[in-house]
Image (cartoon, rainbow, N blue to C red):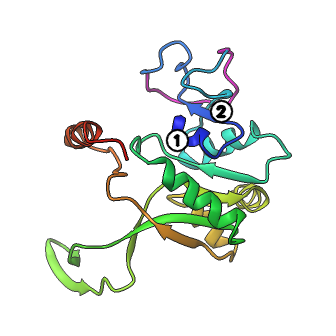
Amino acid sequence: MDAARTVADGVVLVVPEGADDDPGQMGPSGGGESACSPAPWGADRMVTGGGSRADSVRAGLRAVPDEATVIVVHDAARPLAPPSLFTAVVEAVLVAGASCAIPVLPVADTLKRTAGGMVVSTVDRDGLVTVQTPQAFTAAVLRTAHREGGLATDDAGLVEQLGVAVHTVPGDPRNLKITRMEDLAVAEALMVEAPR
């Protein structure tokens, strides 16, 4: 949470149901505010998430004060995001006037489209990027995007559905997403490197 604190006035932590009893517990979510006080891990408030990523973000949004002007959404699955990345997306909104800013990295691998176990075509990777969090938004745009109730794999996708421009900043290759067990070993190796 220290990274978020470098640019944030407050932090809302969205957790699975029951995580206030056991922070490591994973389980179905309900969408209400936790009774846990004070919130752990440096957060100002802790709320229970929902059954989908969008539901969890909506639960967090309900805990964000109405007077907030910029909201940053970050996935816990990317624990190595440096403070500079939070600063970059927030500055893109506050200084450059973007409604939404996301960190991206160019696609390095060759991409192929397959069907039935066979290669159908090679995808031109020119202009393709992978997307990371944290993602920063003007509060009004993010709240509107979630009120529409659409589906997307990230919050920027919901903003795109509104027809709002999504700006990009350079991502960080060390800001990996931990989705498999082997990712933990990579993250541990990165954590013993010198501070960034």
Q: What is the span of residues highlighted in magenta in the rendered image? A: 25-37
Q: Position of residue 143 (x, y in %)?
A: 75, 55
Q: Which mark is residue 31?
A: 2
Residue marked by disc 1: 3
Point out residue 158 in the picture as x, y percentages from the top left corner.
62, 64
| Amino acid bearing label 1 | Ala
Q: CA distance from mark 1 to mark 2?
A: 26 Å
Examine the rendered structure and indicate whether residue 135 appears above or below residue 111: above
In the picture, residue 132 is in which quadrant?
bottom left
Left or right, 98 with reference to 28:
right
Q: Nearer the viewer, residue 74 or 81?
A: 81
Seen at 39% across and 73% down, the residue is: 129
Q: Is residue 141 left or right of residue 192?
A: right
Residue 100 painted magenta: no
Q: Is residue 151 visible?
A: no
Q: Earlier in the sequence, mark 1 or mark 2?
A: 1
Q: Is residue 77 left or right of residue 19?
A: left
- Seen in the picture, residue 184 relative to 113 is either above or below; the reply is above
Residue 70 in picture, x, y percent from top left = 73, 54
Q: Secondary structure at mark 2?
A: loop
145, 182: nearer the viewer: 182
